[in-house]
Image (cartoon, rainbow, N blue to C red):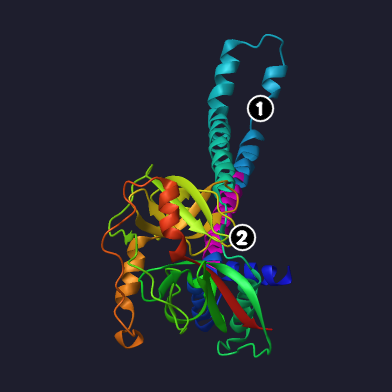
C-alpha cells in the first residue's frame, strides 16, 4: 500500500511538472518499461481533469450565489398581487442573475454527466502474466531510484525459485519464440514448455515500449518444429473479425474464442487491438489468430473494470521486432511461416495443429 501511495504521489508530481529533469527522465524510463504504470498515469490524468471540471462548477455556483443575493425578493412580498410594472422592473433588474443561474444548472448537468462517464471508462490496464509480484518489485525498485536518482541500483538477492510466467508461441521452426516483455522482465533464467518437453531459452531481443520479447531455445534436447502452420499477418484486422487465442492460464493449454471489438486499446492506445475474449493471468504472450490462421496479435492484458475487454499487441510490431534483431544474435535466419495450413479447418482441427507451437513460459528469479 505504501509503495502504491508513493507511486501515485510521483505520478501527480510528474503531471504537475514538479519533478526535476533527472527525476522526470527516470520516471519516463519506468513508464516506458512498465505498461501498467503508463496506464496509471493516463487514469490519473483523467482524474485530475475531472477535479478541474468540478472546481469550475464550484466557482460558477459561487457566482450564482453572489448574483442571487442582489435579487430584491421583497418586491414580490409587499403585495399579494403586485402591479405588472413591478414585475417588469424586477425582471429587468434580475435577468442577469437568472441567466447565470440557468447557465450554471446546464453546465453542472453536462459536467456531472461527463465526470460520471469518465469514472466509468477510466478502467486500468492489467497485465496478464501469472505472477504480479515481480512487477510490484520492479515498480518499487524504480520508485526508490526516482527518489534517490540512482538508477543503477540492483537487488542482489541470492537463491532461485521458479514461477509460472505466461505464454509464448513459435515464430520459426528452429526455436525462436515471441512473448510479452513484461512476462520475462527481470528474469534470471527462463524455460519454455510444450507437449514435447521443457527447454531453457535465452532472450535475444526485447522491446519494452511495444511489450515484446523474442526468445531462442538454447537446449540440445530440442528438435526443430515442423513448418509453422500459421503466418504473421502484415495488414490490420477489422472490427467484428472473429479471432481466437491459445495460452496457459493454468497447467494445460486453453482455447478462447471471440472477435475484435475495437481498432485501438485502452484510452485509444494504437499499439493494441481490443478484443472480446475472456482471459486470465497466464494468457499474456499467447497468440491471437484469425480464422484463416494468421497471427494478428499477442495477448498482453485486459481492462480490469470491463468484462471481456482484452488487449493484444498488433502483429505489425512482431514484424518490426523481427526486423530489428541484430544479425549477430541469430544462429540462423528466423524463417517464420509463409503460408497458413489452418485456413478452412474447423476450430478443433486448428487447435490440434497449433498446440505444439504454443509454450508455457516459466521464469526463475533470485530471492
The residue indicated by pointer 2 is 250
Q: Which residue is at a point 54% across and 79% down the rendered structure image?
A: 190
| Whole-percent x, y for residue 10 in the image | 61, 72
Give me the C-alpha separation between circle 1 and circle 2: 73 Å
Give the crowd class for mark 2: few <14, some 14-19, many >=20 residues within 10 Å. Answer: some
Which percent across, then down, holds residue 278?
Answer: 55, 49
**Which residues are the magenta region?**
37-57
Q: Is residue 17 visible?
A: no
- Position of 164 compared to 223: left or right? right
- Tag on residue 313? none
Q: Taking 240 as reference, is 25 above or below it?
A: below
Quadrant into which the N terminus falls: bottom right
Dividing the image into 4 quarters, which one contains the C terminus? bottom right
46 and 339: which is toward the camera: 339
Q: Identify whether 356 is placed above or below 75.
A: below
The reply, left or right, for residue 173 in relation to residue 149 is left
Residue 53 highlighted magenta (yes or no): yes
Which residue sits at x=61%, y=62%?
A: 251
Q: Residue furthest left?
A: 338
Mark 1 lies on residue:
72
Task: Give the percent coordinates (x, y) of residue 183.
Answer: 54, 71
Which residue occupies 53% across, 31% down? 99
Main SS of residues in magenta:
helix
Looking at the rendered structure, the number of numbered marks drawn on it comes to 2
Amino acid at each position: 500500500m505504501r509503495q502504491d501511495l508513493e507511486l501515485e504521489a510521483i505520478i501527480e508530481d510528474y503531471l504537475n511538472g514538479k519533478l526535476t529533469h533527472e527525476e522526470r527522465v527516470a520516471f519516463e524510463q519506468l513508464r516506458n518499461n512498465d505498461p501498467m504504470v503508463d496506464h496509471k498515469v493516463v487514469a490519473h490524468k483523467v482524474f485530475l481533469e475531472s477535479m478541474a471540471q468540478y472546481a469550475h462548477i464550484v466557482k460558477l455556483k459561487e457566482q450564482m450565489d453572489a448574483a442571487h443575493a442582489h435579487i430584491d425578493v421583497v418586491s414580490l412580498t409587499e403585495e399579494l398581487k403586485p402591479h405588472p410594472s413591478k414585475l417588469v422592473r424586477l425582471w429587468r433588474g434580475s435577468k442577469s442573475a437568472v441567466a447565470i443561474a440557468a447557465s450554471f444548472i446546464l453546465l453542472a448537468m453536462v459536467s456531472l454527466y461527463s465526470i460520471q462517464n469518465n469514472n466509468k471508462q477510466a478502467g486500468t490496464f492489467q497485465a496478464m502474466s501469472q505472477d504480479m509480484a515481480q512487477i510490484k518489485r520492479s515498480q518499487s525498485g524504480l520508485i526508490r531510484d526516482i527518489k534517490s536518482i540512482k538508477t543503477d541500483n540492483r537487488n542482489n538477492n541470492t537463491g532461485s525459485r521458479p514461477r509460472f510466467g505466461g505464454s509464448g508461441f513459435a515464430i520459426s521452426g528452429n526455436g525462436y519464440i515471441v512473448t510479452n516483455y513484461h512476462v520475462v522482465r527481470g528474469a534470471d533464467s527462463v524455460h519454455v514448455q510444450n507437449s514435447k518437453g521443457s527447454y531453457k531459452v535465452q532472450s535475444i531481443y526485447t522491446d519494452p515500449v511495444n511489450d515484446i520479447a523474442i526468445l531462442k531455445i538454447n537446449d540440445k534436447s530440442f528438435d526443430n518444429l515442423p513448418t509453422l502452420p500459421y503466418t504473421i499477418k502484415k495488414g490490420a484486422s477489422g472490427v467484428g473479425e472473429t479471432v481466437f487465442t491459445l495460452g496457459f492460464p493454468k497447467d494445460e493449454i486453453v482455447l478462447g474464442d471471440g472477435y475484435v471489438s475495437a481498432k485501438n486499446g485502452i484510452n485509444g492506445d494504437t499499439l493494441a487491438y481490443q478484443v472480446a475474449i475472456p482471459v486470465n493471468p497466464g494468457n499474456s504472450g499467447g497468440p491471437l489468430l484469425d480464422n484463416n490462421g494468421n497471427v494478428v496479435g499477442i495477448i498482453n492484458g485486459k481492462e480490469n473494470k470491463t468484462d471481456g475487454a482484452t488487449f493484444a499487441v498488433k502483429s505489425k510490431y512482431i514484424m518490426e521486432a523481427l526486423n530489428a534483431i541484430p544479425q549477430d544474435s541469430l544462429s540462423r535466419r528466423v524463417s517464420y511461416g509463409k503460408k497458413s495450413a489452418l485456413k478452412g479447418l474447423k476450430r478443433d482441427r486448428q487447435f490440434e495443429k497449433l498446440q505444439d507451437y504454443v509454450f508455457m513460459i516459466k521464469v526463475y528469479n533470485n530471492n
